[in-house]
Amino acid sequence: MSVGKAWLAAVVLVAAIVAGVGLTYLDRPELTAGFDSTSALELPSASAEPITPLPRSIAVDARKVDLGRRLFADPRLSADGTISCATCHDLNTGGVDRRVHSRGIGGQQGTINAPTVFNTAFNFRQFWDGRAETLDDQVNGPLLNPVEMGSTWTHVIAMLSADPDYRAAFAAIYADAITAANVRDAISSYERSLITPDSRFDRYLRGERGVLSSREVAGYRLFKQIGCTSCHQGLNIGGNMYQKLGIMSDYFAARGNVSAADLGLYNLTKRPQDLHFFKVPSLRNVALTPPYLHDGSVATLADAVRVMGRYQLGTELDDADVDKIVAFLDTLTGEYQGKPLR
């Protein structure tokens, strides 16, 4: 890495620290305790590479996962019986709906791009602005949002209690049967199970050097050299820190029409230094989850790379460099339950 690029990467890191939001990496016991020991032994040392392979499995309660799967796909949880969690987080399309903004009950238009549900267990917080500390907390967001599912816990519990299959399933797992806390627990247990290990890049990190082409390796090398790994590293290649959108130049001034959804972490803290800070998204399976950014304004992965280069790193990437980085990003698509995502 050149001196200039090394300096730029340092600026990206320091910017977050100076702003007071810090960097929170995935060394939290509550996030890593469920990893199986075999996978843990396979992980390279932190000094080897900035990116770490996903574990091939994590400890989950199979009964809760099965119940959570049913709840996740059940539109009856919504106020009008039309929207389920899976409506906006389709496992067949990368865990997203591929819309600029998701649609809720009554065809209402949301204000932000739906992030993927895959690998959310490895995020340090949930939602773009990080307002939910845990997956359990996250369940409340779309369920109770009047623009999304528009529901209430009274409605949800009444609906589930009227269904004999749900009554039996909850009673078999939870001593207090159907409660809001238990619904959240079941759904979040299912979401924690949605991991996508064994991407070609994970296999490369584990020693299968022939699994990547020379162009893909060159893309990864460039990804590191220009400073992308300042924000996109670790198990989830992101998802473990906040960062400002528009470090090197003003993204929002260039785009215009700033809305409340663009304020990011500021909406929670009301601190001016948190304006336009967002949770850094994971890049896992990123080739499958257009459009990009919190506002869904970028249609293609190549354009997303250009935007990040310009606004986050202060560099205009030429087409050849963009193509290399996109080739690398394509290797981050993993497998779900032993089958490649697409």
Image: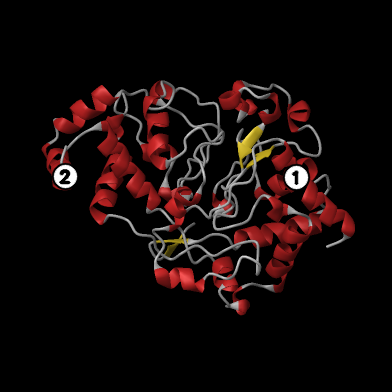
Q: Quadrant of the N terminus?
A: bottom right
Q: Residue at x 31, y 42 (%)?
A: 185
Q: Is residue 154 left or right of residue 10?
A: left
Question: Which picture quadrant has residue 82?
Answer: top left
Residue hosting label 1 = 14
Under mark 1, the amino acid is: Val
In front of the other: 63 or 299: 63
Cα distance between the residues tagged 2 and 1:
49 Å
Question: Which picture quadrant has residue 149?
Answer: top left
Q: What is the count of numbered marks?
A: 2
Label 1: few (<14), some (14–19) or many (≥20) C-alpha neighbours in 10 Å: some
Q: Residue at x 59, y 57 (%)?
A: 234
Mark 2 falls on what kind of element?
helix
Q: Is residue 283 left or right of residue 89?
A: right
Mark 1 falls on what kind of element?
helix
In front of the other: 279 or 340: 279
Label 2: few (<14), some (14–19) or many (≥20) C-alpha neighbours in 10 Å: some
Q: Earlier in the sequence, mark 2 or mark 1?
A: 1
Q: Position of residue 117 (x, y in %)?
A: 45, 45
Tags 2 and 1 in contact by the CB under 8 Å rule?
no
Q: Position of residue 37 (x, y in %)?
A: 41, 69
In this rendering, is residue 105 above or below 197?
above
Q: Is residue 21 visible?
A: yes
Under mark 2, the amino acid is: Ala
In this rendering, is residue 102 above or below 66?
above
Residue hosting label 2 = 169
In front of the other: 297 or 158: 158
Q: Position of residue 230 (x, y in %)?
A: 70, 52
Q: Is residue 39 left or right of residue 84?
A: right
Q: Position of residue 225 (x, y in %)?
A: 78, 60
